[in-house]
Amino acid sequence: MTNMNRRQMLLTGAAMAMPLAAPGILRAADSDTIKLGILHSLSGTMAISETTLKDTMLMLIAEQNAKGGVLGKKIEPVVVDPASNWPLFAEKARELLTVDKVAAIFGCWTSVSRKSVLPVVEELNGLLYYPVQYEGQESSKNVFYTGAAPNQQAIPAVDYFLNELGVQKFALLGTDYVYPRTTNKILEAYLQLKGIKKEDIVINYTPFGQSDWSKIVADVKALTADGKQVGVISTINGDANIGFYKELAASGITADDIPVVAFSVGEEELSGLGKGDLQNLVGQLAAWNYFESVDTPENAAFIKAWHKFTGDPKRVTNDPMEAHYIGFNMWVQAATQAKSVASDAIQEAMIGQKFPNLTGTTAEMLTNHHLTKPVLIGEIRADGQFDVVKKTAPVPGDAWSDYLPESKFLISDWKGKHCGMYNTQTNTCVQIKSNY
Amino acid sequence: MDFLRKNPSVLWFLAILAVFTLAVTLMAPGTGSGAISTSFVKTLGKTLCLAMVALAMDLVWGYAGILSLGHMAFFAIGGYMIGMWQMYARTEEIVITSLAQSPIPPTATEIHQGIASQIFGVVGSSHMPEIWYFAHSLPAQLALVVLVPALLALVFGWLAFRSRVAGVYLSILTQAMTLALALWLFQNDSGLRGNNGLSGLQNIPGLGKVAQETLSVWFFWASALALALAYLLLAWVVSGKFGSVIRAIRDDEQRVRFLGYPVEGFKLFVFALTAVIAGIGGALYYPQAGIINPAELAPIASIYLAVWVAIGGRGRLYGAVMGAVIVSLLSSWFTGGRVPDVPLGFATIHWVDWWQVLLGLAFVLVTLFAPRGLGGLVDLVTGLHPPRRHGAALGPDSGSLQEREAQE
Amino acid sequence: MIRTLLAAVLALTLASGLARAEAVGDILDTNKALVEHASRLTIGPVIDKLAASGDPRAETLLKAWGDKLLGLRKSDGAFVLLKRKGAAYQLTQPDGTDVGMAKRSDINILRPNAGVRRLIDGALVEFQLSSPDLKTRTEALSIIDHHPEAGQLKPLEASLKAETDPALRARKERLLRLLTIRFGENSAKRIAAINSFGADTGLDLRGTLNPLLDTHRIIAKAGEKPKGNIDRPLIPGKTITTEAAYDLLVARGEAPARQTPTARRQALEAHIEGGKVGGIPLAQLSDPEARDRAYAALEKAGQVPRAATTREVRAAVAAHDYWVVYAEADPAMTTAAKAALAKIAVKVDAMQALDLLLEALSLASIYFLAAIGLALTFGVMGVINMAHGEFIMMGAYTGYVVQQIIPNYTLSLIVALPLAFAVTFAAGVAMERLVVRHLYKRPLETLLATFGVSIALQQLAKNIFGTQARPLTSPDWLDGAWVLNDVVSISYIRIAIFVLGLVFLCLFLWVMKRTRLGLELRAVTQNPGMAASMGINPDRINMLAFGLGSGIAGSAGVALGLYAKVTSELGQDYIVQSFMTVVVGGVGNIWGTLAGAALIGSLQKGIEWLNPSNTLAAQTYMILFIILFIQVRPRGIIALKGRAAGD
C-alpha cells in the first residue's frame, strides 16, 4: 500500500475496492503489543471537546511505553473517529472490540454516546473508561466511570450556593439533553428537601448551540424582583456557553448580583472568550474535580508533560483529562496486578485500585465502578483560569441518586452483590445488564 | 415476464444483489468463514437500507422531479416506530423478571409503571406518554412504520402540491419539515426521550439468546430482500404508463396538467409511496445501527441522500443504489481513521481531516462534469452516448439548436 | 474586701479595655482554623470581632483579606499581608511590621469565597461610607444595595449630610428610603417610604416590597379564625385541592400519612402465610382489587396499621380551615406594599411589552443581516447558494485573524468589516466563475454543488482554525447595554447589529436603484437574452452580483461573530433560517426579506414569551407556521407581480 505512489492510489479503483477490504477483514493480531481503543470524536460538534482527550490518551500511552509498557509489552493506541454521530459510536466500539481486539476502550463524552456504546461493551464483555461528569443513574459491569457523578459535582455546588452564597432562588439553565435533564431533576428534589419552594426553582432548556440568550438572561434578571438572592446553575453545554456568558456580561450582571455555577465550563471553554468578556465574568463559578490552577507537584508535572507533548505552551488542561489520567493509570495498575489484560481479570482487579489524583488526594475505584473524587469550586479569574475557593475531601461517587424517589433504594455493587442495580428495599437485583 | 424482458437491468441488479448476499453470507462470522467481522456485516446491511431510501429518493427526484430534502425524516420515523416497540418489549422483559423475584405477583399497573420509569428515567420522567399507546404490540408498531410516514407525506404533500409549491421552494419547505420534526423530537416533552433517542435497538426482544453474529446476518438478509422487493416495485412503477406520466411531470408540469392529468394526484402518490419505502428502510436500518436520535433527521442527512443519488446518477434506479453504496461505504472507511496518511513532505494528509473536503469537491465535480453520475459509466459500457452538441446555442431557450449541431 | 473588689474592678476594666483594643493579629491567630478555611456560616463572629476590635489596622486587614492579599507563610504558618512586587510578594505582619519579601511558592494565599468576601465587605461598609475616595464610597453603596442589613441604616443616614457628589447623594437617598422600608423604626415611617416611590420599576424596590408580602399557609380548627395578618382563606376543593390540604395536615402532624403503593405492597409481603395473604392466594394478588381485599382482611385482624381511606381523608380535611397569612404583622404595611406593587405591575407589564418588542426587533435584525446577502444571490439572481452560511463563517474568521494582527479592537473592527467583504467577495466571484456559472439552467443542481462547496469549506475551516471556538472580542464601547430601566435594556452589540442591518439595507437599495450595476443586474435577471442584446455582459453582471451578495454575507459574519461565537459551524446556524427569511418575505425584493425577518423574529420571540421554559418549542412552532404560511402565500409576504415574477 505505501509502496504505491499517490497517483496510483488515487486513480486505481482503490476507492471501490478498499472499503470492502479494509475495515472488514480481520487483521492478524499483533501479539507483541497490547491494544487500547480511543473512541473520541475527531470531527463534528463534539470534536471541540473530545480531540483534547484523544491527545491526552496518546500522551499517557507514550509515557507508559517509555516506562516499558504493561506486562512487558508496548501499548498500541487504536484511534477511531465516531464523528459525533451516536450510532457510529456503537459501530466503532464493536469494531474496536471484535476487529482490533482492544483490551479496553477509553472514550465517549456525551451521555447519549455512552448509552450508544453501552449495549455493545456489555454484549462483548469489553471495558469502557468514561471520563466525563455525567448524570448517574447507571452502573454497568463493563464501564468504569472516572468522571463525576451528580453527588461529586452538582450536589456540592448547590450546597455551596445554599451555605456560602445564601442563594434562595434557583434558575436551572441547561441544554436540552439527558445530562442536564437528569441532573436538574436530582437538584430539584434536593433543593426541595433543603426547604426551597417549588416556585423558587425555575428550569429552562435550550437547544445545542443556542446563540440568542437575551430573553433568558433578562428573565433571570427579573427573578430578583422578589428580593431573594438568585443563583444560576448552568448545565449549558459546549459552544452555547460563549453566547450565554457574552449576554450575561453585556447585561451587566456580575457574580455579586447573580452567581452562576457551571458544570460544563472549564479552562477549555473559557479559552473561547476574549479578554473583555472574561473581565466581566470574574467571580463566576464552576464546579469540577480538577482545575489547571491547582498547585500540586503532580499537576505541575502533568501540565509540563502536556505542553511538551502538544508542543503548545498555551494548551490548557481540564477535568476530563484528569479523569483519563486516573483511569489509564488505574488500568495499568490493575493489569499489572492481575497479570492479564483480559476483561474479567481487569474488572476484578480494578475495584479497590488507588491512584493519586492531580489535586493532592487519592482516587479509589469503588465497588460501584465510580471513583472517589474531591469536589473543587473555582471562581473564574481574568486570565481564564480558576481560583479554587472550596475543596472538599474525596467524595465517593454514587451511581444511583439518593434524592430521587425511584432510585432512592438502589445501589450498585459489583464485588459482593454482582449487580449494578440492586434494590436494598426488596433485596433484589433489578437488572444485571443495563437498560439503555 | 414481459416487464423483465423490457428491463434487463432489473435482472442484472437482482443477480448482483443475490451474488453479493451469498458472498457476505459465506464470509460472515455467524454463517460462514468469518472472514469479515460482525460489525462489517452490520455496516453492509445498513448500506442496503440506505440504498433502499436512495431508491425512493430517485423515484421522487430523478423521475418525478421533486427535490425533496426531507426524505430522511420518513426514514427516521420508520426507525422510531420499530424502536418504540423494541424498547418497550425489552424493558417489559426486564421489569417482569425483576418483579417476579418478589413474593407477590405484580399488578398490570406496577409493570406498566416499572416500564415507564425504566425507559424515561434517563430523561427525568417516569410517565409513559400517549404516543407509546401501541408500543406493546409489534403488529401495531409495524403497521405504524408504514402508516405514519404515509400519513405525514400525504398531509404535507397535499398542502404543498395543492398550493403549487414547486422547485426550489418545495425543497426548502421539505427541509423545513424535517427540521421541524427534528426540533420537535429534540424536546423531551414530545415523549421520545429527546436528544437521547431510543437506544440498545440491536438487541431484539425475544431473541436475546441469538448471538449478534447470527442476528446481523438475519438483518442483512432482510435488508437485501427488502431492497430487492423495493427495486422490483419501483422498476415496475416507472416502466409503465405511470412512469411516463411522472417523467413528463418532471420535464414539463404545465403541459401534463393541460393534457388533463391530475398532476397533484400523481405527485402525491409518488411522495407517499417513497415515504413508505423510506420508512421501511429505516425500520430495518436502526435495529442494525442500535440507536436512533433526532440528529438522524437533521436536514443535512437528507441533503446527503440527494447527493448520493446525484453521484450515482438520477433517473435510473441502479444509479441511486450505486451512489448510496459507494459514497456511504467510502465515508465510513475514510472517517474510520484507518486510511493510511499521505505524507507530502511539508505536511501530512490525515484523511480524517481531509475526507470531507474531498467529498465536497467530489460533489462539485460530479454535478459539473458528470451530471449523469456514476450510472453514466454503465452507458459507456453499453455504448449509449448522448448526441454531441457543440457551440453556442442559437436561441435563448434551453434545448435550442446549437451552432455545430445546426451545421451538420 | 474593698481592696479586692477594687482590684477586681480594675482587672475587669483592664481586661475589657484590652479586649476593646485587641490586636487584629491576635484575633486571626486565635481563629486560625476558621480563617484558613473560611465559610460564610462560621466566619461571621470572627469578622465582627475584627471590625469591632478598635485596632486601626482592622480596615486594612479586612480589605487585604477580601482582595485575596492575606496569606499564610508556609515556613511558620504566620498570617502575612501581601503586596505584589513583580513576581514576588512583599510581606507585612498584621500589625504593620514589614517582614521582607517572599516568593509565590512560599506563601499560601487565602482565597475567601464570595460569601465570605460579602461578609468582609459588609463589615467594611461602615468604614467606607464616609471615605474621601469616591470609588470606595460607590463600592460601599453597591454592597448595601446587594445585601441590605438593619445596621446599615444609621451609618448611611449619618453619611448623607457630608456627601458632596450629587449622583452619589441621590443614590444614597434612594438606598436610605429602601432601607427604611425594610428596617424603619415604625410602620408610619416605612409606609411613608413606600409611598415616596410611586410606580417605580426598579428591581431594588420590587425586591424590597415583595418580601413584605411573603405568606405561608396555616391550619386552624374549623370555624376558628387564626391570629395574625390574614391574606385570604383557602377553600378545599376550590382554592386548594383536597390532596394539598390533606398534605398540609400531614405535614403539621394532624393526620396520618397516606399509604404509598410500595408501603402497602411491603405490608402485604410481610404477612404471607402459607402462600396466602389475608386468606387470598398469592397468585391472585396481581389484581389490585384482590390486594385491597387482602389488606382489609389484615386490617381487620389488626395485623397492619389502618391506612387512611378516601372518606377519612375527606373528613380530616373538612374538620379544618386553611388560611394564607402574611409574615408581616402590620396590615397597614401589607396594604401599602400591595397597592404600591399593583401600581408597579401595570408599568412593568408595559415595559415588558416594550422589551419584548426590542428583542424581537433585535432578532429580526440578526436574521436580516444573515439573509441580506442571500436576498441578492437567491432572491434576485435565483441561485441557491448553500455555501452562504460558510461565507458568513469566513467573514467571522477574517475578523478573528485581523484581531490577532491588530490588537486594538476598534481599529481591528474597522479593518475587519471591509476586509471580510473583500475576502468573501473574492470567494463569491471565484465560486460563481468556477461552479455556479455552469449551472444557471439547472437550479436544483446548484443546490448540490454549492452544498459540496459548503462542506468542503467547513472542513477546511476546521483544519485551519481547529474545532475550538475562537474569540472575536468587541471593542469596549460596544460592551454593556443600553438600559432604560430595570426591565428594558438591550446590549450595545445588538444595537450595532441593528444599525449594520440598516446600513446594508441602504447599501443594497442604493446599488440596486441608483447604480448602473443595479440597473444592469435587474435587466439581466428579468431577461438575460434581451439584456445581452442591449450590450450588457450577463456573465460579468452575474459574477459581480454574486460577489456582492457573498461580500455582504462576509461583513455580516464579523458582526454575528461578535455577538455569538466563531466556530466552523457558525454558518450552519443561520443557513436554514436565512432561506426561510427570504422565502417567507418573498423572493426578489429586499423589502420582502425585511418583512420576512421581522415576521420570523417577532413570531419566535412571541412564542418564546408564551412558553418561556422551552426555546425549542418556539423554533418548532415557528417552522410549522412558516410551512403553513407558504400554503397561504406561496410567493411570500411581498410577491412580485407581472413580468418580474418570472414563471
Image (cartoon, coloured by chain):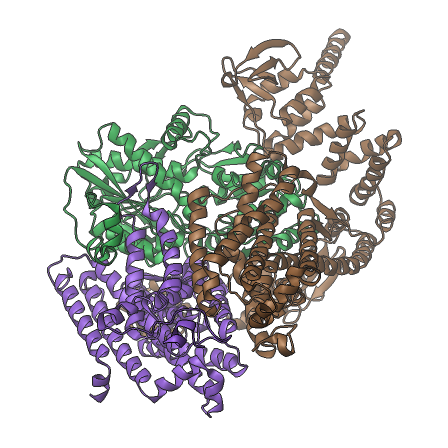
Chain colours: A green, B purple, C brown
Kindly indicate the quadrant of the structure image that contains residue A20. bottom left
* Furthest residue in direction top, as rendered: C3
Say left or right for A368 vs C31.
left
Q: Nearer the viewer, residue B104 or A156?
A: A156
Query: Where is residue A227 drawn, in percent x and y?
Result: 70, 48
Say left or right for C364 vs B9.
right
Q: Is residue C623 visible?
A: yes
Say left or right for B76 vs C482.
left
Q: Residue at x 32, y 47 (%)?
A: B351
Q: Residue at x 35, y 43 (%)?
A: A370
Q: Is residue C260 visible?
A: no
Query: Where is residue B169 drawn, in percent x and y?
Result: 52, 72
Query: Where is residue B11 drawn, in percent x and y?
Result: 20, 78
Kindly indicate the quadrant of the structure image that contains residue C23. top right
Q: Residue at x 35, y 84 (%)?
A: B243
* Furthest residue in direction bottom, as rendered: B260
* Furthest residue in direction left, as rendered: B33
Q: Nearer the viewer, residue A128 or C97?
A: A128
Question: In the displayed structure, would residue A119 be above or below residue B259?
Answer: above
Say left or right for A95 vs C242.
left
